[in-house]
Amino acid sequence: MASSLQCINSDYILMSLFMDIIRVKQKKKMRIKLYASVMFIVFILFAMWSLFDGSNSTYAVSKDALLVDKVKRGELYISVRGSGVLVAKDIRWVATTIEGRVERILIKAGAEVKAGDLLMELSNPQLEQQLEETKWELEEMGAHTNAQKVSLEAELLDQKAAVINEKLNYERALLTLNAQKKLLEQGIVAVSQIDHEEIKIEVAQYKERWQLEEKRLDKRRQTVSAQLKAYQARLNRMTKTLQRVQNQVNSLSVKATMDSIVQVMPMELGQQVGVGTNLARLARKGQFLAELRIPEKQINNVLLGQKATIDTRTSKVEGIVKRIDPAVVNGSVQIDVELIGKIPSEARPDLTIDGVIDITRIPNTLFVKRPMFVNSHTKSQVYLLDAEQKYASKQAVEFGQASAQYIQIQSGLDVGEDIIISDVSSWDEHQQIQLN
């Protein structure tokens, strides 16, 4: 019995040892596998780091996804591009000078009119009544003025008659005096000395009275002239008042002030309007300005008098820069271009347009299509392609003046070299890229 137990114990011990040996072997295999997995992951990470790190290897880019341009030498045409709209050069609002109510609208927006054409009719019964009353007052004042004129002329005639009467008395007395004097000189005593002296006194009196009446006549003429002027001034004032009221009544008929196109007609039938209300906006036909928005970074190259080309998307017309707005709005500056060429048939207010302003021409210079995000008169880095165009490396370049499409190269590139001009921001941290 004891021997049997010993056998069982020894077998159990052997089995335990065998199991321990198996577990140890399994653990070693698991460690080896784990170590191999870790090494494999480290290798993969190292390979990826090596692939994408620009300092040690090359970033691959599809060549078909790139825009490439070749450096050229020649005359560089510098221009600035902007977009905007056409606006009428001569715009006028037709406003009312009196109050009224819109009775009729004869012309709608978009219609072509001539100067004097009737646009709409207003009504103002009070104004029309005032016109009639003013006519009556003027007629009454005119009749009163004529009556006063007749009266003054009659007084003047009376004074003239008084002058004539005194003159006749003086001449009669003078005739008697001369006759008496002649008789006394001949020694005829038919006339006494006393009578002779009395007639002398009468002659002097009549002469004095005659001269006095002459002065009265002059004063009467001046008085009549002054009174007639006063009456005429009042009559003229009433005439002017009538003309003013008549003009106000005439202005109830709203007419076009020039040959034009009606741009805006905001009135409605029955609408009450006050003094100064804008009734219609007119734009002279065939005369336009181009309003362009130029980026603020390029506006320093634009000057008054520079030539420009306006593109209506259908045709092109020449122009000259006439005004540069002093303010920057939303990153751009407005300029006005006066059109000097033949106005195209499609031109109309608020038509969307593009414009190119001629800045200058630089002869015999290096230039290339402007890379994205590169500005004029700056130093930047671009990707320069090798001769086989398999790789592109960063190259420092100094740029000069820029146009809407091209930019001048001051240094860093030579004729015939190719550079990438598309967006490179996604791999800009790499010194070199590979082109697939």
Image (cartoon, rainbow, N blue to C red):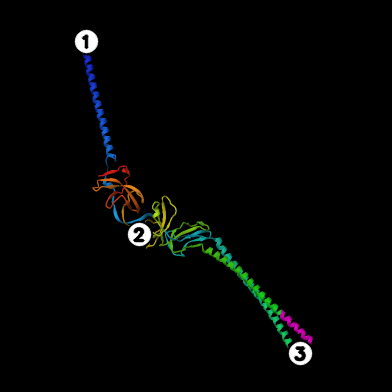
Please indicate whether residue 76 sits to the left or right of residue 111 in the image: left
- Counting residues from the N terminus, which is met first, the one under dot 1 or under dot 2? 1
Which kind of residue does numbered mark 1 sit on?
A: Gln
Residue 98: give x, y in percent of width and height.
Answer: 53, 60
Which residues are drawn in magenta?
A: 192-208
Q: Position of residue 242 (x, y in %)?
A: 57, 66
From this viewpoint, is residue 147 visible? no
- In terms of image quadrants, where is residue 355? bottom left
Front residue (pair 46, 330): 46
Q: How far, Cα to Cα, is label 3 from label 1?
A: 219 Å
Which x, y percent locates residue 307? 38, 59
Q: How many marks?
A: 3
Which percent across, then down, holds residue 309?
Answer: 36, 58
Q: Is 185 colored magenta in this rendering?
A: no
Badge 2 element? strand
Q: Is residue 334 visible?
A: yes
Q: What residue sits right under mark 2 in the picture?
A: 316
Image quadrant in which you'd find residue 308: bottom left
Q: Residue at x 42, y 54 (%)?
A: 334
Say which mark, if any, is on residue 378.
none
Query: Residue at point 73% right, 87% down?
Result: 178
Quadrant showing the C terminus: top left
* Residue occupied by mark 3: 184
Front-most of residues 105 and 432: 432
- Which residue in the structure is indicated by mark 1? 6
Main structural element of the magenta stretch: helix, strand or loop?
Answer: helix
Q: Amino acid at mark 2?
A: Lys
- How packed is label 3: few (under 14 Cα within 10 Å), some, or many (20 or more)? some
Residue 205 lies within the magenta run: yes
- The residue nearer to you, when weighing 294 against 374, is 374
Q: Quadrant of residue 434?
A: top left
Neighbourhood count class around disc 1 (C-alpha, 10 Å): few under 14, some 14–19, many 20 upward: few
